[in-house]
């Protein structure tokens, strides 16, 4: 698997699937979630509602992932995952890692070969970038998956730097 780091907007990625940093309601929100629903159009929300009515009446649990159409996005599918809310008093890294491995498991079920992730939990959910980036990178590198390209799409320079450092540390490459 190849890992790419790019600065940009998750909604314009030309990949098989983009990952949404959703909440358990699956009914929309701000940040990445708002951008995906805005640009992807109503087909995504319609499918999210059906998923709530059928598979997840109580909402999608933290650390899990589920797929919908990509609607009007360049990506064919959106994989919605729910990151943990950061807590200083509790280690929630396993849940953040699970968002990545579960999203890749869903990608395998779909037959997606390229997947773009935002920096899950590092916005409204408050995870410090320096803690989240190594968890995300290690989870992806350790995943047993058929996905060939994982692209982390970072919104700003701080996020890009954190993921670049995490990737260099995880792969032992000199910086
Ligand atoms: N493309 C790529 N990255 C983005 C974009 C974008 N268009 N917009 C923001 N980011 P967040 P979370 C970055 O808050 O922390 C929503 O309301 C952003 O700078 O989207 O998992 C949901 O409904 C940050 O680094 O996700 C949930 O309620 C990262 O993406 C809640 O927020 C994630 O920020 C989820 O919070």
Image (cartoon, helix red, strand yellow):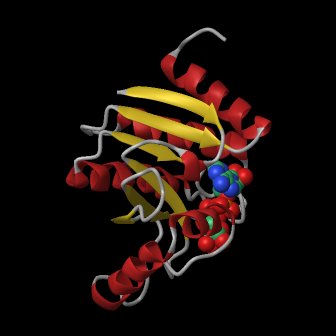
Q: Quadrant of residue 30?
A: bottom right
Query: Is residue 153 placed above or below 59 in the rendered structure?
Result: above
Q: Quadrant of residue 127?
A: bottom right
Percent x, y for residue 168? 58, 20
Q: Quadrant of ligand 1?
A: bottom right
User: Could you say where residue 5 lies in the image, as x and y percent from the top left?
Assistant: 58, 30
Quarter of the N terminus within the rendering: top left
Residue 97 placed where, x, y %?
47, 50
Report whether residue 152 is seen: yes
Q: Residue at x 42, y 55 (%)?
A: 98
* Left or right for 62, reference 7: left
Q: Residue furthest top?
A: 174
Picture residue at 63% right of the left edge, 75% below the top: 29
- Quadrant the C terminus occupies: top right
> Measured along the vertical axis of the image, is residue 9 above or below residue 92?
above
Expressed as whole percent of the image width and height from the top left, the position of residue 146 reads 24, 37
165 vs 48, left or right, is right
124 relative position to 3: left or right: right
Q: Depth check: 127 or 7 in front?
A: 7
In the image, what residue occupies the spot 29% across and 46% down?
A: 112
Q: How many numbered circles are shown?
A: 0
Furthest residue to the front?
Answer: 72
The image shows residue 130, relative to residue 100, as above or below, that is: above
């Amino acid at each position: 698997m190849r890992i790419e780091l790019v600065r940009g907007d998750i909604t314009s990625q030309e990949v098989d699937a983009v990952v949404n940093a959703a909440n358990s309601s699956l009914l929309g929100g701000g940040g990445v979630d708002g951008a995906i629903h805005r640009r992807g159009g109503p087909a995504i929300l319609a499918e999210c509602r059906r998923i709530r009515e059928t598979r997840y009446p109580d909402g999608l649990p933290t650390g899990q992932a589920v797929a919908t159409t990509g609607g009007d996005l360049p990506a064919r599918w959106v994989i919605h995952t729910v990151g943990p809310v950061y807590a200083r008093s509790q280690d929630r890294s396993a849940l953040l890692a699970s968002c990545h491995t579960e999203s890749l498991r869903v990608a395998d079920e779909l037959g997606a070969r390229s997947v773009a992730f935002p920096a899950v939990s590092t916005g409204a959910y408050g995870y410090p970038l320096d803690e989240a980036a190594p968890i995300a990178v290690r989870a992806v590198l350790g995943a047993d998956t058929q996905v060939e390209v994982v692209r982390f799409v970072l919104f700003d320079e701080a996020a890009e730097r954190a993921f670049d450092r995490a990737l260099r540390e995880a792969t032992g490459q000199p910086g």
